Image: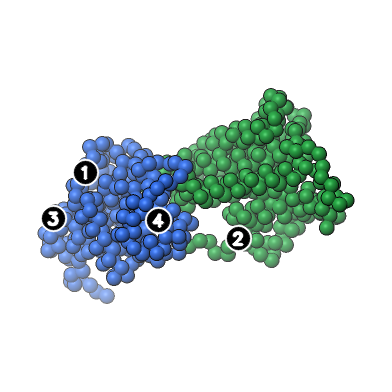
Amino acid sequence: MLKIENLVSHYKTIEALHGISLSVGSDEIVALIGSNGAGKTTLLNSISGHVTKSGLIEFNGTDISNMPAHRIARCGLLQVPEGRHVFPGLIVEENLFVGTTAITGIRLLAGNQKEKLDMVFSLFPRLEERRTQLAWSLSGGEQQMLAISRALMGNPKLLMLDEPSMGLAPKVIEELFGKIVEINRLGTPVLLVEQNAKLALSVSARAYILERGNITLEGPSEELISDERVREAYLGKRKSKNQ
Amino acid sequence: MNLQLLFSGFSTGIIYSLIAMGMVLIFRSVGIMNFAQGEFLMFGGYFCYMFNRLLDLPIGLSLILASICMGFVGVVFMRTSYWPLRHAESKAIIVSAMGASIALKEGARLIWGAVPVTVDRASEGVVNIGTAVIMKQNIAIIVIAFMVMVLIYLLLEKTFIGNIMQATAQDQYMASLTGIPVIVSIGMTFAISAMITGIGGGLLAPLFFLNNTMGTTAGAKAFAAIVIGGFGSVPGAIVGGIIVGLVEAFGGAYISSTYQLVLIYVVLFIVLMLRPQGLFGEKIQEKA
């Protein structure tokens, strides 16, 4: 589905990713784990066309490494960015309509989207209650649901989620990750970027560990969860905690 | 209350509203005050003159054609003066807009000459209400401008394409992630902005002669209208424009016609002292 080979990304003259290779299959959840500043978001932004880069990025057999961001989205590769980025001044429903641009492009009227709306509302009933509310007035969890739903409105062939758990209460996170698994079960592969390694490993089939712009470890999530290095660095095994 | 002054003030005011509204649309879209907006008014007026007087088309059709031409001018303006500098500091873009305003002014002089010209009235004659004599053109201006505003409101708030433009204005990065070509979306916003302001030029031309420098003063008044109404607010721009027009008309008649522009700024100062965020402005920006 998604295949990346030897990806090198730059911010102006600073190299942020030093040759990443990664793949996502057609029905799996793949987790990308790393600490702050490891380059997780840079990697997603490179894939979606927002960072200058070199190397091969192939999606469904098409080379997308030189495509502009909006064309990549039109291919069905949809990213839900860190910090949710709902359109604050549009109501929930309009946010969802805008998501359909990925399928149809710009047009005068939204047309009948009832089927799609029903699909996301059955997944996130809370959004239906908030249907006519401006997006900025939603809670953090609701905004995350909206951001994911907006991407679902665009029929994603691959969904890239960047830190969906950020800033949310544990209970909300649990609910949200249940939905992510459900979305995957309905047939959408997911590339999940998370700082919360335990959570990410528990829902994913495979995982990559990203450290300072390099992939240092990869494998099935079950194996990684018991890996000594992973436990020490990401799963909070108490060893060198001084505070 | 002098009805005659009320109508003439209101009708010039609503034209300032059209300029101010155009500026606000661009401001909300890209965060830049377009100091060439007044030139859109002048250019729209000249296009109208070209269709109406040089090609002898009826005024209604001329207004529509002029507006369409202004749509293209808006796109070209965006592509040349804004887009290459979109990642630069806003100062650079403001200077580039000022440069574009000089180019538009001198361009108009090259194309249409320096002699002031005029166009037909949208509606001839006068209406008598009591002792007041009101030009039908003033009424036509108010009606047409109001129709334009309603159309723009419907387009931006009730259509998908309007949602797309708003979404792009609110978050360009996210817009491109949902598959919106940002350059197209911003281009449409500039086109609409130039179109509504351009119509104002065609409406104003029968009252004041067209010349290639008229845009600068009109633009300055529209800017005052935006500040009075509240930065970034469309209703604010509309109400601010009308206030400026009324102050100009009544101040000119009762106080001093030489100090019309000064009076506008006096009102501006008073509003800023009492309500620094403007009449419709919000103290705190939207939570993002």
Callout 4 crowding tier (Cα within 10 Å): few <14, some 14–19, many ≥20: many
| Mark 1 lies on residue | A1
> What is the spatial separation of the Cα atoms under label 3 and label 2, in whole angstroms?
54 Å
Is residue B29 in view from this perspective? no
| Mark 3 lies on residue | A220
From the rendered image, report the letter of the chain displayed in green: B
| Mark 2 lies on residue | B281
| Amino acid bearing label 1 | Met
| Amino acid bearing label 2 | Gly
Q: Chain of mark 2?
A: B
The nearer-to-camera label among 1 and 3 is 1
> What is the spatial separation of the Cα atoms under label 2 and label 4, in whole angstroms?
24 Å
Q: Earlier in the sequence, mark 1 or mark 3?
A: 1
Q: State if disc 4 and disc 1 touch (CB < 8 Å).
A: no
- Residue B231 image point, x, y percent: 60, 56
Q: Earlier in the sequence, mark 1 or mark 4?
A: 1
| Mark 4 lies on residue | A85
At mark 2, the secondary structure is loop
Q: Residue furthest right?
A: B131
| Amino acid bearing label 4 | His
Q: Earlier in the sequence, mark 4 or mark 3?
A: 4
> What is the spatial separation of the Cα atoms under label 1 and label 4, in whole angstroms?
26 Å
Residue at 34% across / 63% down in the picture?
Answer: A125
